[in-house]
Image: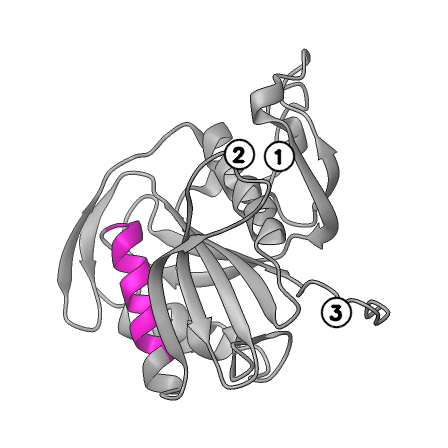
């Protein structure tokens, strides 16, 4: 089996977009991650692999897993998946790895994978939007946020065939914009309601292409800007 992602997809400009911990761009990290780990066994596997690649590319950046946050709006203890600490800036990262059933081997070491189906794509959407809302709460003047989703579930990046589902405000397909008050269902189930202060355009990127049904993996990345420094105007 051969991973076909690297040769067929153009890599975005290395320094485009926000930087992780003020040091390295996400396209750079993802390009290396694609080479090292085209598939992951679990979300924890993704977290560890991402942190390892980031450290290899930017050795001066410190990484911390499962960091407790002290958001004044939190009802209880909240933990951040990964905190990246640079000399002048920090990046808070939340990961989601939602899979459809797939079994096969993946380069570079022909490692065997057996991925289970998480199903419930509506809850996957809710979870990703919740990550964005959490990262907005965790914002600090010198800290940006990144919500990162990797999946082989095509229903997450495909436009819906109907628009009357309970998660219609939470849809993540290509070209959507998430902003403002997002309600869950016709009756607005309040525990699942989310409010986003920012506006986020959604653009999916190829991650890897493996053999077999559901062998295509894509990723969705949303950056959350740092909290404006008091007394200074927000950047446009």
* Quadrant showing the C terminus: bottom right
Determine contact: label 2, label 1, CB under 8 Å: yes
Identify the element where label 3 is drawn: loop
Marks 2 and 3, the one that precedes in the sequence: 2
From the viewer's perspective, is 30 left or right of 20?
left
Residue that carries the numbered disc 3 in the rendered image: 229
Picture layout, residue 128 above or below residue 185: below
Question: Which residue occupies the foreground of this view, 47 or 165?
Answer: 47
Residue stretch rendered in magenta on the structure:
42-54
Q: Which mark is residue 126?
A: 2
Q: Residues within 10 Å of mark 1 (few under 14, many from 20)?
A: many
- Residue 90 percent across, percent down from the top left: 52, 73
* 210 to 174, vertically: above or below: below
Whether residue 52 is in magenta: the answer is yes
Image quadrant where residue 84 sits: bottom left
Q: Nearer the viewer, mark 2 or mark 3?
A: 3
Q: Position of residue 89 (x, y in %)?
A: 56, 78
Q: Distance between the Cα atoms at labels 2 and 1?
A: 6 Å
State the image quarter where residue 52 is shown: bottom left
Name the residue carrying label 1: 170
Query: What distance separates the C-alpha of mark 2 from that of mark 3?
Result: 30 Å
Q: Position of residue 33 (x, y in %)?
A: 35, 72
What residue is rendered at 65% in x and 52% in y? 202
Tell me what residue is drawn at x 50 percent, y 63 percent: 92
Dot 2 crowding, Cα within 10 Å, few <14, some 14–19, many 20+: many
Q: Earlier in the sequence, mark 3 or mark 1?
A: 1
Rounded to the nearest whole Å, what is the CA distance between mark 3 and mark 1? 30 Å
| Vertical side of 159 occupied by 141: above or below | below
């Amino acid at each position: 089996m051969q991973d076909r992602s690297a040769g067929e997809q153009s890599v975005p400009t290395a320094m485009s977009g926000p930087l992780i911990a003020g040091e390295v761009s996400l396209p750079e990290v993802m390009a290396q991650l694609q080479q090292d780990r085209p598939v992951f066994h679990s979300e924890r596997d993704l977290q560890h692999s991402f942190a390892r690649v980031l450290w290899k590319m930017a050795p001066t950046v410190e990484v911390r897993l499962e960091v407790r946050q002290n958001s004044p709006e939190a009802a209880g203890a909240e933990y951040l998946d990964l905190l990246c600490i640079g000399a002048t800036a920090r990046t808070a990262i939340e990961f989601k790895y939602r899979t459809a059933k797939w079994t096969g081997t993946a380069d570079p070491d022909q490692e065997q994978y057996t991925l289970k189906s998480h199903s419930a794509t509506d809850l996957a959407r809710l979870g990703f939007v919740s990550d964005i809302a959490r990262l907005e709460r965790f914002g600090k003047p010198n800290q940006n946020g990144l919500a990162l989703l990797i999946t082989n579930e095509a229903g997450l990046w495909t436009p819906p065939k109907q628009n009357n589902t309970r998660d219609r405000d939470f849809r993540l397909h290509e070209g959507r914009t998430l902003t403002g008050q997002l309600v869950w269902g016709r009756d607005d189930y309040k525990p699942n309601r989310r409010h986003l202060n920012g506006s986020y355009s959604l653009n999916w990127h190829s991650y890897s292409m493996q053999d077999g049904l559901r062998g295509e993996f894509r990723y969705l990345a949303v950056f959350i800007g740092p909290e404006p420094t008091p007394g200074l105007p927000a950047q446009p």
